[in-house]
Image (cartoon, rainbow, N blue to C red):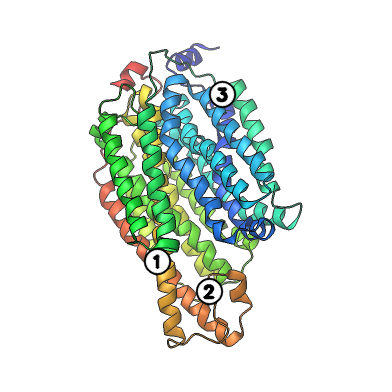
Amino acid sequence: MSVREEQQVDSGYLPHRQIMIVLSGVAAGMLLAALDQSIVGTALPRIVSELGGLDKLSWVVTAYLLTSTAATPLWGKVSDLYGRRVIFQAAIGIFLVGSVLAGLSQNIGQLIAFRAIQGLGGGGLMALAFSIIGDVIPPRERGRYQGYFGAVFGTSSVAGPLLGGFFTDGPGWRWIFWINLPVGVVSLIVTSMALKIPLVKRSHRIDYLGASLIVAGVSCLLLYLDWAGSEFGWTAAGSLALLAGFVAFAALFVFVELRAHEPIIPMRLFRNAIFTVGNAYSFLAGLAMFGGLIFLPVYLQAVQGMSPTVSGLALLPAVVGIFSTSITSGQLMSKTGRYKIFPIAGAVVLVVALGLLATIRVDSPYWQVAIYAYLFGAGLGFTMQTIVTAVQNAVGRADIGTATSSTTFFRMMGAAIGTAIMGAVLNTRLEHHLAQQFGGRVPSGGVDANNVQAIQQLPPQVKDHVLAAFTSAIDDVFLASIPFVAFALVVAFFLKEIPLGTRGDTPSAMAG
């Protein structure tokens, strides 16, 4: 080993050659989590046809989202205490066990339970992957590797629908879970061989009460968002009880964390302006970003008549947008050491993209939609990694896992809340626009505007009105996303900019 490489290892960072090996294993773990939602969504109609339980369909997604969101801060804290590699591998192991069991499910109840197990592991995959990157790559150089992270998200957004359609139509939907096994095994092998991160031994105590409170609080909020719009109503007694439970558990969590010896999310971190602003930005951006990612494919399938597989390919311009700006902003960040401009630029581009997407019509040519999708992806590419890098750079090395998982947690919370809000906007505005299209009179036989396949089978004179109403409702969804991104833009201006750490910084210097 050269003198330079010895200095790099002493500082806790790895040389470029070893970083690339580690990235391959970490990226495989990230791919497991990123691929899950898009590949499962494509197969859900076939799964319900075989297992039954149409009324419990949403729980296949909600169970995963609930456990993964609630578990995210726990993974970060435990990895700070016991080491990144072994905890990352534990998350992969739990995710793979859940995947195998989900593929063996014999009824919808079993599938929901096993998806919850998957979520427990999935909650750690993304947060711990970013934490590992923070351990082995100095902040100033992280931009050089940003394109690889964008590749994972871009690949999953396209490969998910493609693989979901292929397995569902071919060997069977169970393979959408079993395909995780080879990817997970590769990640386990690579991280075992290449991921050597020194762990500073220190006394520790797990904050079991704080962990229980955050799980209870997140569960109440996600159940409120899932049930209120579809089963009980937003102001029903049961719904309001869940909302009140969330507020109470959140307040208790803060009270406990202020006094805990090893808090799950140390409240002292919120005194760090970059940590606070970065998490606020992640939450607001998640509200709008994930809503757009979900409802653009809905337009392509329901209005343009594309299959899930083709709609996945049609999203390639968005992937190209993510690649182009992610790589460019990463290189500029490494070269200049500046990062504040990129969340600002990303929010501006996203506002423009959402405004343009809100103008699409039934007969909009695909090339026009593709341009808007590219801009949407470009906005995401500017923001996806720069906030994480800024937060990691602003905290001590001992808090990187906790800070990274907190940022991931707030982004996932924003995604969950945003998806629920945008789903409610779509359903409410769809009813409004259908009433306008049909003059308040429902056609004979009724109209199931929530079933993409049923829409395509409607008589032409009815189908035209339904598609027009559906497109107008989708436009309203994109319009409703704009205020959240605009608020994120305002928040971005308050993001402090401090010098990015380099290889020459010692761990003690970084902690200071």
- Report the residue at 41% width, 27% height from top: 77
In whole angstroms, how far apart are the C-alphas of marks 3 and 2?
Answer: 52 Å
Residue 183 coordinates in the image, percent (x, y): 65, 37
- Report the residue at 43% width, 57% height from top: 227
Q: Quadrant of residue 200?
A: top left
Q: Residues within 10 Å of mark 3 (few under 14, many from 20)?
A: some
Q: Nearer the viewer, residue 489 or 405?
A: 405
Residue 187 coordinates in the image, percent (x, y): 61, 31
SS class of the residue under badge 1?
Answer: helix
Q: Nearer the viewer, residue 411 or 118?
A: 118
Residue at the disc numbered 2: 449
Q: Quadrant of residue 225?
A: bottom left
Residue at the disc numbered 1: 425
Which residue type does callout 1 highlight?
Answer: Val
In whole angstroms, how far apart are the C-alphas of marks 2 and 1?
Answer: 14 Å
Which residue type does callout 3 highlight?
Answer: Gln
